[in-house]
Image (cartoon, rainbow, N blue to C red):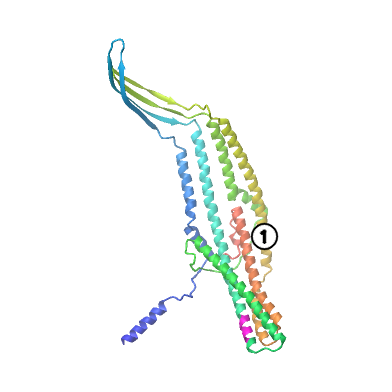
Amino acid sequence: MKRSFRFAAVCLLVLSIPSRGDSPPRVRTADLVSETVKNNPERVFYEAAVQAARAELSAAGRLPQPEVHGSAGSKRSRDFQSGLSGEGVAWSVGVTQTFEWPGRLSLRKAIANQDVELAGLGYQRFVQALGNRVRLLALTLAGSQERAEVAAQVANRLHELRETLLQRDPAGITPILEVRILEATELTLRKRSAEARLSEDSARVELNLLRGQPAGAEINVEPAMPTLGEIPPVTVLLASAETNNFDLRSRAAELRQQGFRIDLARNERWPAFTIGPQFSEENSLGQDRLAGVAVSFPLPLWKNPAKNVAAAQARQLQAEALLAMGHRDVERRVVNALHNWQARKTELENWKPDAVEQFRSASELADRHFRLGAVPATTYVEIQRQYFEAVETLLNTRREALESVLDLEQLTGMDLSHSLPGTP
C-alpha cells in the first residue's frame, strides 16, 4: 500500500514538472513595446538628464548666496602730543549680496529652459526609437523562426528521400546524380536554416537585453499578418517633419538658446556689483565705531566683452547652418523612406494571400510524385528550393516595409501604425 502511494506521488511530481521543450506563451508586439519602455535600463539615463536640467533651471533663476565676512585683531594706538598710548581689540563684520545686471537672470533662465526642452526631446526620441527597434526585432524574431522551420522541414524531406534512394542501391548514372543533387540541396538548406537560427538568437538576445531580461531568456512573439494602409502624400509628411521631427526641434531649440547666449554676452559687458551693510569697532585709547554700506564691483581691465559677443554670434551662425542642413537631410530621408515603402507595398500586393500555402502544397505534391517516379529530380529540387525562397522573400519584404514605415514615423512624428506589416 505504501509503495503504491509513493509510486503515485512520484508520478504526480514528474507530471507537474514543465517540459524543457515547452515554449513560452506568445507575446503581442504591443505588449513587448510597453514592457521594454518600462523596464529598459537606459531609460533611467534620459530621465536623469531631464531631472538634472530641471534642477539647473531652478538654480538659474536665483541670486548668488549672500556672503558674511569679518575680521578681528589687536590695535595699539599712541598719541605723540600727550604721550598716551593704549591697546585694545579691533573687529569688523559685514554682509554682502551680489546683484546681477538687470535682465541677466532672466536670460540665464531662458537658456536653462532650452536645456530642459532639449533633455525632454532626447527622452522622447529615445522612447520612440526604442519602441520602433522592439517592433522590428519582434518581426525579425518571428520571421527567423518561420524561415528556420521551413528550411529544416525541406532539408529533412530531402534527407529522408535521399536515404530511401540509397537503400534501393541505385544503378546507373542518373540515380547517382539525383542523389548528389538531393544531397547538395539539403546541405544548402541546412546552412540557410542555421543562419536563420543565428538571426533568431541574435534578435532574441537584443530584445531580452532591451527589456531588462537575461540574454538567454525564452520569448515567443505572436506572429501577425500585415495590414497594408495608405501613407499620406509627401507634402503632408514633409510638413509634419518640419513640426515634429526630433532632430529639427532639437536644432531649433539650440538656435533659440544661442540667441539667448548672445544677449547674455552683451549683458555681461556690465559687471555685477556687490553691496551690503558693514560694522566695525576699535578699542585702544578710546572706542571708535563705524557703520556704513560697502559696495564693490570688478574692473574689466583685461576682459574683452566684444570678443565674447562675437564668439556667441559665430556659434549662432553654426546653429543656423546645422538647422538648414537638418532640413535638407530630413527631406531626403522622408522621400527615400516613402519610396521604399511604396516599392515594398507594391511587392506585397503582388503576393496572393495563400501564395505560401500553394508553394507548400506544391512541394508536398512534388515529393509524392517524385517517389513514384513521375517527377524528375531537377523539377523536384527546384520546387523545394522555390518553396523556401518564397517564404524567405515574403518575410524579408515584410521586414523591409516595416523598416520604411518606422523610419517615416521617426522622421515625421506621425502615427502610421495602421500601415505596419507584422504588427497586431
Q: Is residue 198 magenta?
A: no
Residue 354 seen from this side: no
Where residue 311 sits: x, y (%)? 59, 36
Image quadrant assignment for residue 321: top right
Residue name at image x 52 percent, y 26 percent: 301
Q: Which residues are magenta?
A: 157-164
Question: Which residue position holds label 1?
Answer: 340
Q: Is residue 251 above or below residue 80?
A: below
- The 10 Å Cα crowd at callout 1, few under 14, some 14 to 19, many 20 or more, is some
Of 367 and 193, which appears nearest the observer?
193
Q: Quadrant of the C terminus?
A: bottom right
Q: Residue flagged by tag 1: what amino acid is it?
A: Asn
| Residue 51 at x, y percent in the picture | 46, 47
Left or right of residue 141, residue 368 in this image: right
Q: Residue at x 49, y 51 (%)?
A: 46
Where 176 falls versus 64 (above or below)? below
**204 left or right of 284 in image:** right
Viewer-nearest residue: 317 or 234: 317
| Magenta stretch secondary structure, dominant | helix
In this view, the residue in front, 92 or 213, is 92
Secondary structure beneath label 1? helix
For the image, the number of numbered tags is 1
- Figure check: 17 above or below 215: below
Residue at image location 60% in from the left, 48% down from the top = 248
Q: Position of residue 270 (x, y in %)?
A: 52, 28
